[in-house]
Every structure is written in C-alpha cells, then in structure tokens.
Image (tube, rainbow, N blue to C red):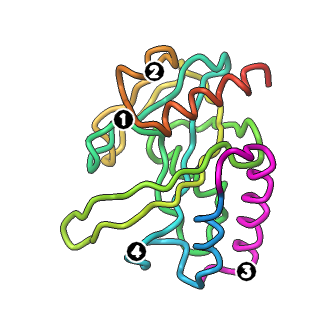
Amino acid sequence: MTPPSLVNSLTALLDAYAVSWPEESVDRFREFLASGEELQGKSNPRRHITASTWIVNPARTRVLLTHHVNLGIWVQLGGHTDEGEDWTVAALREAHEESGLADLRLVTVGLFDLDIHAIPARGANPRHDHYDLRFLVEADDAAPLTVSEESHDLAWVELSALSRYTDEASQHRMARKTAYFASS
C-alpha cells in the first residue's frame, strides 16, 4: 500500500492546487485517495497515479514534448510512480530518463496541473486511467536531448505553435497556465 506519508503529501498538494485553481475540480483525485486502492506502480489494473513535467525554457516560450511510442501522440514527459516514491521525485526522474536532461529546475513546489486520461488496452494490460500529477519545470532548451525507448522523438515546441503538435485539451490548458508563470 501507498505509505501514509505519501497520501498525506498528495492531500496537501491537492489542497493547495484547489486554492490556486478553484475552477478545476480535484474531487476524483480525492475519491481515489479515499478508496484504499493502491495508488502507485502498475499493480492496480483500473487506475494509478502518474507524475509528469511540463518542461519550459527559461523564457517560457517553448515546451519540451515527447512523441510517445505507445500512444502515438505528442505529450509532456512523465510516467508511473514507483512504490514509495515521492511524487515530485518521480516526475523529475521520468523527465530525466525520457530526455537525458540533467539540469531540471522546479518552477514551483506545488502542482501545476492535474489530468485524468484513459490509456487504451495494450497486450495484457487492460484499459485503465492515469491520474496525472503535473509539475512545472524549467530547462535549457539548448541542452542536448537523448530520446529514450519510450519515445519516437523529442521536440522543443513554441507555445504559439502547440496546435501543430496536439489538440489535447490538457496540453493547451498547460500552455495557457504557462503565461501565469512567465514572470516567475
């Protein structure tokens, strides 16, 4: 089971997020926390918490996206949390593993965005939901990138050109939110 300390830290993250973004509901995340189901890893076949990073350049004009091998779409970098792993640590680990970037800096200590999205069945893995915790991270867009086996490609995308890469509502929501942190 997910350690109580991680449940408590996620509760605090959700509480702070609800204050910062009151128009966005955290109810389904809270229901999942209260369910007693396993939150981390892949053992829960229905749903699990994932951790992602919306990586922007220092000028906040570009975002790093990955063309995901399994999903076939451009998305932010992130993935599954390991059992007992801190949420932020998981997001930064995934970002490093998927990009090769060593110098990743959290812009804020709290959540930047939340999203729940369906992952289609694949092989022995049934359709399930990812409850994605998203953190705003800054990195040098001139630093070399390393494409992992989880990706077809990586690209720094101008926020103004995001619609050429994706029509995913959550991606565009994060692009809009980026402007809020442009002067941070």
Instruction: Identify the residue at image location x=42%, y=39%.
Output: 75
Frontmost of labels 1 and 4 is 4
Question: Which amino acid type is shown beneath numbered disc 3?
Answer: Pro
- Who comes first in sequence, dot 3 or dot 2? 3
Mark 1 residue crowding within 10 angstroms, few (<14) / some (14–19) / many (20+): many
- Who comes first in sequence, dot 2 or dot 4? 4
Do the residues bearing badges 1 and 4 touch, measured as CB atoms within 8 Å? no
Question: Which amino acid type is shown beneath numbered disc 1?
Answer: Trp
Frontmost of labels 4 and 3 is 4
Question: Which amino acid type is shown beneath numbered disc 4?
Answer: Arg
> Magenta residues, as a range?
1-25
Do the residues bearing badges 3 and 1 touch, measured as CB atoms within 8 Å? no
On residue 4, the disc is 3
Do the residues bearing badges 1 and 2 touch, measured as CB atoms within 8 Å? yes
Give the labeled residue for mark 2: 157
Give the labeled residue for mark 4: 46
Frontmost of labels 2 and 4 is 4
Question: Which SS class for mark 4?
Answer: loop
Give the labeled residue for mark 1: 74
Viewer-closest of 170 and 73 = 170
The N terminus, quarter of image? bottom right
User: Farthest residue in the front direction?
Assistant: 23
Residue 11, percent from left and from top: 74, 67
Residue 69, percent from left and from top: 27, 45
Question: Which amino acid type is shown beneath numbered disc 2?
Answer: Val
